[in-house]
Amino acid sequence: MTFMLQEKLAMNSPAISRRVFLKGSGGLLAGTLAFTSGPIALLAPSSSWAMPLDSLSTRQGEILLAAVKHIFPHPHLEDAVYAHVVRSLDKKSEIGDFHTLLYNGIKDLDERSGGDWLALNNIEQLDQLSAMANTSFFQTIRSDAVVSLYDNSLAYAHFGYGGGEGDVGYLHNGFNDLIWLPDPPKPEGGYLPNESVS
């Protein structure tokens, strides 16, 4: 999923006001890119982004976005990439039991935090979230994010994935480009299945 422009389109339509658009949707996550240069900025049509939510409210989306950022911290990863997890959770929350799980988890997080988890500073937010690490709420967010956070073109661009969507895979597109580690010793059979022993 790329950046959503539905809010912009709705606001420019003479028949639909911004208020009507927001009232008719579950909620809206919106923001501005923090880094105006870099791979994600090159993919984005503008520095502003918006992602409509079908069943979660804006506040619920913001809480889930902040929670995912604590669970999978990447200091220079744009919120627009983290929003993919919220969108995935939003789609799944159309099922009653899943929505109840998220709703109750967010409610519990707020109650543990004196009423408003988002009002806490980052360290306090992390402390309260960590206390829920063994709950179904936390585990659901974590397990969804393992896939939805990293399996999209924006994440590929940020992390330097060597291949593109729909390609032959990562095997021949830089899986062994370990720029953050020292060069490992070459295995006896080579790195690739079709290499001969040197």
Image (cartoon, grey):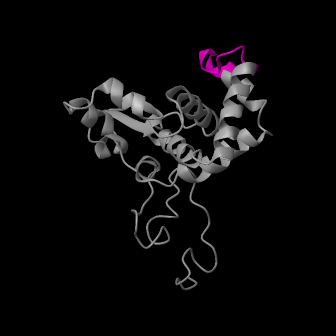
Quadrant assignment, res 4: top left
Quadrant assignment, res 112: top right
Q: Is residue 141 visible?
A: yes
Residue lying at 62% horizontally and 16% vertically, measured from the top left: 121
Q: Quadrant of the C terminus?
A: bottom right
Residue 19 image point, x, y percent? 34, 24
**Closer to the camera in the image, 58 or 143:** 58
Residue 67 image point, x, y percent? 62, 33
Residue 114 image point, x, y percent? 72, 13
**Closer to the camera in the image, 169 or 107:** 107
Task: Please say if 182 is above or below 86.
Answer: below
Image: magenta residue range: 112-124
Quadrant assignment, res 108: top right
**125 within the magenta span:** no
Residue lying at 48% horizontally and 39% vertically, measured from the top left: 83
Q: Is residue 30 visible?
A: no
Residue lying at 25% horizontally and 37% vertically, measured from the top left: 9
Task: Please say if 64 is above or below 115.
Answer: below
Residue 183 image point, x, y percent? 56, 59
> Going by the image, does 126 lie left or right of 159?
right
Task: Please say if 42 is above or below 28.
Answer: below
**Closer to the camera in the image, 112 or 82:** 112
**Closer to the camera in the image, 167 or 176:** 167
**123 within the magenta span:** yes
Q: How many tags in the picture?
A: 0
